[in-house]
Image (tube, rainbow, N blue to C red):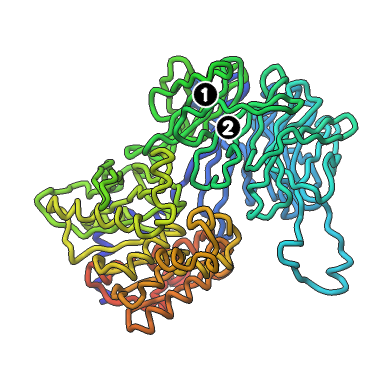
Amino acid sequence: MRAVYLVVLAHLCLAGVPTIDDLLNLRSIGGAEISPDGKFVAYSQAEADFEQDAMVTQIWVAETATGRRWQLTRAKQGAGQARWSPDGKWLAFTSSREGGKNQIFVIAPDGGEAQRLTKAENGVGSFDWSDDGKTIAFLASEKQPEDRRKHLGEFEVVRRDYAHQHLWTLDVEEAMKAPVAGKQRTKGKAFSVGGFHWAPDGTRIAFSATVNPDLVNNGTSDIYVLALAGDSVKKIVDQAGPDRGPRWSPDGKRIVFSSAMKNPKHFHANSRLVLVSADGGAVRSITDSFDESPNLVEWNREGVYFVSQQKTASHLFRVNVETGKIEQVSKTPAGFGVSLTADGKRAAMTMSDGSLLDEVYVTDVTTWSPKRLTNSTEQVKGWTLPVSEVISWKSRDGTVIEGVLTKPKDFDPGRKYPLLCVIHGGPTGVDTPRMVHPRYYPIDIWAGRGALALRVNYRGSAGYGEKFRQLNVRNLGVGDAWDVESGVEHLIGKGWVDPQRMGVMGWSQGGYISAFLATSSTMFAAVSVGAGISNWATYYYNTDITPFTIQYLGADPAADPDIYQKTSPMTYIQKARTPTLIQHGELDKRVPIPNAYELRQGLEDRGVPVEMIVYKGFGHGITKPKSMRAVMQHNLDWFNHHLWGESKPDFANPQVPKAKEEKEK
């Protein structure tokens, strides 16, 4: 069978179908930042470095007039968070290239040696320039006392031990001479700073902060203003949150921020953009009429700009702060990383669609005619890739559901194909048409073998309005399964799918839905559960975001055991028949690994074929190239066995290619 597998693999390669390593070695583009004058765009390019087993990001620059591009950073440790100085003469970025902790560096946009600005003991988080370019503010944690560790060793007091984040500033001219620790501006254990923004005159910084860095306290986020003269802090918004991400008005008199407007169920409800005086006082929402969550971009003289998902596309909008009138600025999809010039007349963004990889674009805001600056798609020239389209159907309760159907390039509507359902996480994620699918699930390889792939935007997904996003409140798993199964039935009804050769898989919330289908449905020939919830009670008592569970299910497991029973895959374990692969990160705090062990044992107790693979050293996501290769290979082998009849994989004793040196011998 090994020989047969190699013949099949060779055939795929000859046909131009990408391999797992081809997919992992794709360079991906993101983080477009336009220069203040609009002449350049800085962006990031990430690629796998198998030698150091890391995803390494470097900063590139493109000239908007000519499209000329060049790589700006080259250190082995990579770089991130590119930020232009207000005069456009410098690009600041963070990197761990010296000492292993992120520090701030600056480099001229035409190249040269980078200069280190900070020597923050615990490293630097986010940062930004003041409008005059003389000062940089950044986030860092305070120095932790050493006495306890030296005397008693390492331990953590749960929900008591925190490294609070605080604001620091540095004088750029001074730091250009030699790296500085910076001046700490906020202190203590009263709050932990999140997003922040400089006032136009450089005398104040608005910031959001929670009572501590624990994710369970996200709802405590409020808005503060720091006066740099004397480092005095004033809370200007104090309401049930979260309230976060403040930005100043051009005249420095008001602040706009994102708010749940006292709604405790902020995980699945629309957020609002809200105004408040810089001195505090009453707050006023300016996006009540907008049925989605707006992601704040900028406030300039034309109004407040934000980006929001609209079904499977995202768009740029502008709201008039006086009238509340909202208009869509983008005439074509805008991507999510929109960056505006200082005068607000030009924009840069990163976008992808079903015909291109992620690329950087620039456009005049008023005419909106994006010009592509990068050519990342050239990487896949010669590959045999599938095509994707958005389809819709009605779920069991009549709700209209959309999904992205990926078909082989030579799709024949008269033929029946194997079907792979790949379910996104969130649950407020959203799937969009993509040219290539490089993470966890090798859709492009399966399509090359002659298979369909369906990615379902099940109830709860973003982009379809608040009502749709709340259709799985107290109905998790149940309604989600309806949406997946009805989508499958829709394709079967068209005569395109072989009902005996179907699989379902997903990560996080997608893993939970896959687990729910593994135990409550016999529709599929095989399932893969990635970092999925198997028992909501187990999840609630172990996760790092317990409020999420309460907001979706309404109470804790002791107060309402029935809803936890209804929505938990383990409730239906006696019905389970489907061979299931379980994949989980060893150190996952979001969906702790007891969920995986519980599902594995429940399936084994009933004689259901099950394999469980634990990826060592990882949390909720698998982020290093070699382990990402393993995740994809395990999924490929699992479904190739159950849908194509290939040999049963021996995950404990895989066939590992010999090193290049051994092959040459």
Precedes in sequence: disc 1 or disc 2: 2
Q: What residue is at 41 percent from the left and 79 percent from the top?
A: 602
- The residue carrying mark 1 is 347
The location of residue 478, given as percent across then percent down, is 35, 59
Q: Residue at x 77, y 71 (%)?
A: 154
Q: Give the residue type at disc 2.
A: Ala
Residue 238 point in image, percent of width and height: 71, 38
Most distant residue in the left direction: 414
Q: Nearer the viewer, mark 1 or mark 2?
A: 1
Which kind of residue does numbered mark 1 sit on? Answer: Ala
Query: Can residue 113 be seen at all in this image of the molecule?
Result: no
Residue 492: quarter of image? bottom left
**With respect to residue 260, does 450 lie above or below?**
below
Measured Cα–Cα span from mark 1 to mark 2:
12 Å
Q: Check disc 2: other Cα within 10 Å, few if <14, some if 14-19, many if 20+.
A: many
Say the numbered circle drawn on residue 42: 2
